[in-house]
Image: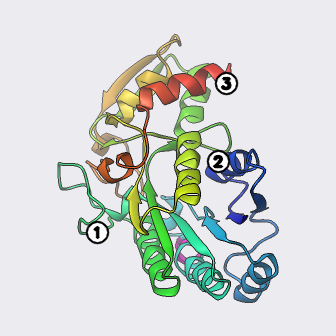
Amino acid sequence: MRIVVTGAGGQVGVELTLLLNQNSQYQVFPLTKKEFDITNEEIVCKKIAEINPDWVVHCAAYTNVDAAEDVGKELCWNVNKNGAAIIGKAAALSNSKLIYISTDYVFDGRKHTAYQETDETNPLNEYGGAKLAGEKEIFRTCLDSYIVRTSWVFGKYGKNFVYTMLKLAETSKELKIVDDQYGRPTYAKDLAAFINYIIMNNPPTGIYHFSNENTATWYEFARGILKDHNVKVLPIRSNDYKQKALRPKYNVLSLEKAKSHFQIPTWETALDHFMKNLK
């Protein structure tokens, strides 16, 4: 089985590539940003046609949420919308199945209960809007597609909230963290395992929500990260922490659909596993 992974240098892409390479039945083609410009249709279609994959896992994305509000807006939409359309077209031309990694930011967080895959979308920021547009392009261009929405991703590779907290704790004895935004942390390794499950088992196509079990605020997540560090973590409101992009207040993804196929660990268990490996 031939599998292309775009964004193979990112935290999900690296974990997925490592996992897929453990299976001798897979031939994995990891494509990084430097060697594979997903916004260039000629390059993308030629490369995908040469590989002729059974699966394309599209992890590549523009993820700077605040920069996407101004200086990075054009690039965000070009990568997340136009790039998705190009990948979708190339996958369809090669008769490949496609998995697209999306985000909880397609929702506005005003529901106050967990978001189902069928719930109405309403992004609050440019990043969420561009990723939602990318979802639509995927379904428009490639019928044999899966969309996996996720949230608050952390892992060994790349930048993430866990590394930010650990770095700040090196020089600060007190940290103020937002305590009125709710979501689900996601361990990149667990997300990679779920993607691998889709490839191996071919569940019905469509949208799936995946993160780790249990809900947290950023403050609660930070306390979990720093529980063994000599630093005081204090809760603050979103209004006291200025950011360019609006963030949803309650963006908890329902996991019921994914759980009907796959056993999902809690974020606390996943974080403990990550921290032990980090040491």
Is residue 217 shown left or right of residue 41? left
Magenta range is 73-77
The amino acid type of the residue labelled 1 equals Thr
Seen at 75% across and 89% down, the residue is: 42
Mark 3 or mark 1, which is nearer the start of the sequence? 1
Numbered marks: total:
3
Mark 2 is surrounded, within 10 Å at the Cα level, by few (under 14), some (14 to 19) or many (20 or more) other residues, namely: many
Mark 2 or mark 3, which is nearer the start of the sequence? 2
The amino acid type of the residue labelled 3 equals Leu
- Distance, label 3 to label 2, CA atoms, is 14 Å
Q: Quadrant of the C terminus?
A: top right
Question: Residue at label 3?
Answer: 278
Horizontal and vertical percent for residue 49?
Answer: 76, 83
- Magenta stretch encompasses residue 74: yes
Mark 1 or mark 2, which is nearer the start of the sequence? 2
Question: Residue at label 1?
Answer: 121
- Distance, label 2 to label 1, CA atoms, is 26 Å
Element type at mark 2: helix
- Distance, label 1 to label 3, CA atoms, is 36 Å
